[in-house]
Amino acid sequence: MTHNDQVNGLCIVADTIKKFVSLMDKTEARKFGDTIRRFVMKGGTYVGLAHTNKNRSSDGKRVHSGTTDLLEDFDCAFMLDEVEKDEGRRVVAFENIKRRGNVASTAAYSYSIEEGQSYASVLASVGKVGDEELTELFRQSEVRSDTPIIAAIEREIANGIRSKMLLAKAVSCTERIGRNRVVTIIERYTGDDPAVHKWTFATGGHGKREYTPLT
């Protein structure tokens, strides 16, 4: 199509992209990226869907599978993740991880997951989720993801470990996660509002912070 100038206005969706190119082969991915670039330069649009790794990053984010070559070659990339799932609805969010041009940093949509529906009914149920609702859903999702680490921090505080760095070291060992993530969670839930925070601190000698749980 590129060679014959039959591209202008055409959009191709590859689901999934690994059926057309090996995401683990850097040379093959680079050649494929060059082919797609020529297609796009003639006026086409190429949308490639790909899977993520089973394991998330240290900050709980999804990680794309394979080498970074295709990600580097494409003009725009979004990571898709589930934000909420209840008895009748699922909410998913797109988070931009690469952009060339003016695109939204996030976008979220909900759709029905009730049993017995036709595909057309599911498709018709798709609706955009507003920014305020999405912010609250992200907060709730973050709390659910952080809950095991919060419990581990509270347990170590109860065992007499009160400094941030010692808490990070202890929880990192018991939960097998990075210390930086533990520090982030300690800071995220530090404050005086029991509706949001889990612990507070008092400053002791030499500026050392001693953490205590909120009641």
Image (cartoon, helix red, strand yellow):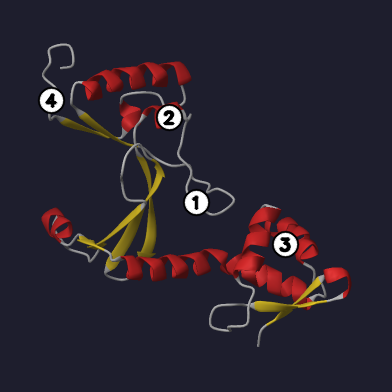
What separation in Å lies between label 3 and label 2 (alpha carbons)?
Answer: 35 Å
Badge 4 density bin: few <14, some 14–19, many ≥20, Cα 10 Å = some
Residue type at mark 1? Lys
The disc, 4 or 1, on the residue closer to the chain's N-terminal end is: 4
Q: Is residue 176 visible?
A: no
Q: Name the residue that disc number 1 marks.
A: 61
Q: Which mark is residue 72?
A: 2
Q: Position of residue 144 (x, y in %)?
A: 50, 68
Q: Name the residue that disc number 3 marks.
A: 171
Point 57% across, 65% down: residue:
146
**Image height of 53 relative to 133, above or below:** above
SS class, disc 4: loop
Q: Position of residue 100 (x, y in %)?
A: 35, 36
SS class, disc 3: helix
SS class, disc 1: loop
Please state which of the two labelled residues, at mark 2 or mark 1, is closer to the viewer: 2
Please state which of the two labelled residues, at mark 4 or mark 3, is closer to the viewer: 4
What separation in Å lies between label 1 and label 3 (alpha carbons)?
Answer: 20 Å
SS class, disc 2: helix
Please state which of the two labelled residues, at mark 4 or mark 1, is closer to the viewer: 4
Q: Name the residue that disc number 4 marks.
A: 8
